[in-house]
Image: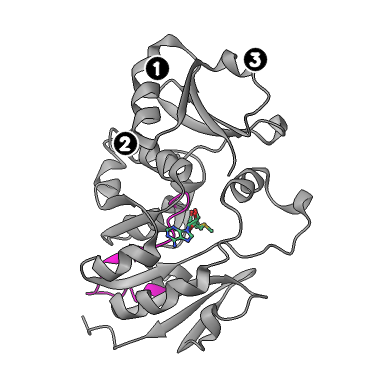
Amino acid sequence: MPKIVLGYCDKVDVDLAKKIAQQWQFEYIGDVAAIKQRDDIDFLLQVDQQVLSLKKLDEPKLGGIVVDFVEGASAHRRKFGGGRGQDIAKAVGLKHGFTPSVLDATAGLGRDAFVLASLGCNVTLNERVPAVAALLENGLSRANLSTEIAPITKNMVLRHGSSIDAMTACGEHDVVYLDPMYPHREKSAAVKKEMRVFQTLVGEDLDADDLFEPAYALAKYRVVVKRPNYADFIAGKKPSMSIKMKKNRFDVYVKQAIPKG
Ligand SMILES: C[S@@+](CC[C@H](N)C(=O)[O-])C[C@H]1O[C@@H](n2cnc3c(N)ncnc32)[C@H](O)[C@@H]1O
């Protein structure tokens, strides 16, 4: 288990830093300068002007991971990403007249969930790694303060815990979306800096196959699994159809037809 601690950069963030540390059970170190006296820490979560970020201390050049739905890549994709015509929308069965509720059982940094929410879906996000869930929650709460983005993020509900356990008692969802980590082929230098920090924190989700059965039992209409193009089917199950993209594909497991709008 990597050692993760949490601190603030400036005193204005003391209350939020303490609150996050307590909620997610991270060791609280106060001012982040305190890490200089320590050599046992792998990751630093820091609060700077209300923004929570995660840094890998032995590779400071990689920068920090932040969840930001208001600016950056998510905002760009929301404006220019192709709306209901994009592959993820087709995969979950978004059609005129039908907008599914989605359980994103492997939420990660919430990017796919945000795309679905911006297309009108109610999305429940489940994430099991506390540091990732904390980043997500911070990103969601900042987005909820933006008049432009709050109408989208209000449709995103975050839960913490393993989806393998939670899905058996998870209410009803039209679609279950799965995007577990998959062993990466690219040499680490080719993987984006941010992804390298994320990969070393989260690992490879070696139990990913165990997500399929509970997901299929729970979904009303379909399960969608995002995989790298070179990856086998999840749990060895052949999908009803696949939507291929440049590097990834969506494997779609249909249970019953999406209602006609
Ligand atoms: C590849 S990332 C997902 C990226 C996400 N689709 C996005 O757009 O940001 C996979 C995430 O799923 C989480 N995960 C894997 N298995 C899980 C499980 N059984 N329950 C909850 N979260 C899980 C991992 O911790 C990791 O954060």
Amino acid type of the residue that numbered disc 3 sits on in the rendered structure: Gln
Give me the C-alpha separation between circle 2 and circle 3. Answer: 32 Å
Residue at x-position 47% and y-position 12%: 10
**Is the residue at mark 3 in contact range of ligand 1, meaning its CB lies under 8 Å from it?**
no
Callout 3 secondary element: helix
Q: Quadrant of the C terminus?
A: bottom left
Residue at x-position 58% and y-position 14%: 34
Which residue is denoted by mark 2 in the rendering? 141
Give me the C-alpha separation between circle 3 and circle 1. Answer: 21 Å
Give me the C-alpha separation between circle 2 and circle 1. Answer: 15 Å
Residue sitting at the far top: 11
Number of numbered discs on residues: 3
Q: Name the residue nearer the viewer: 1 or 243.
A: 1
Residue count near mark 2 (Cα–Cα under 10 Å), binned few <14, some 14–19, many ≥20: some
Reading the chain from its start, which is encountered first: label 3 or label 1?
Answer: 1
Question: What residue span does the magenta drawing correspond to?
Answer: 91-110
Q: Position of residue 168 (x, y in %)?
A: 28, 70
Callout 2 secondary element: helix
Q: Of the residues tagged 3 and 1, which is closer to the observer?
A: 3
Which residue is denoted by mark 1 in the rendering? 13
Which residue is denoted by mark 3 in the rendering? 37
Reading the chain from its start, which is encountered first: label 2 or label 1?
Answer: 1
Is residue 101 highlighted in magenta? Answer: yes
Residue count near mark 1 (Cα–Cα under 10 Å), binned few <14, some 14–19, many ≥20: some
Q: Position of residue 171 (x, y in %)?
A: 20, 67
Q: Name the residue nearer the viewer: 99 or 17.
A: 17
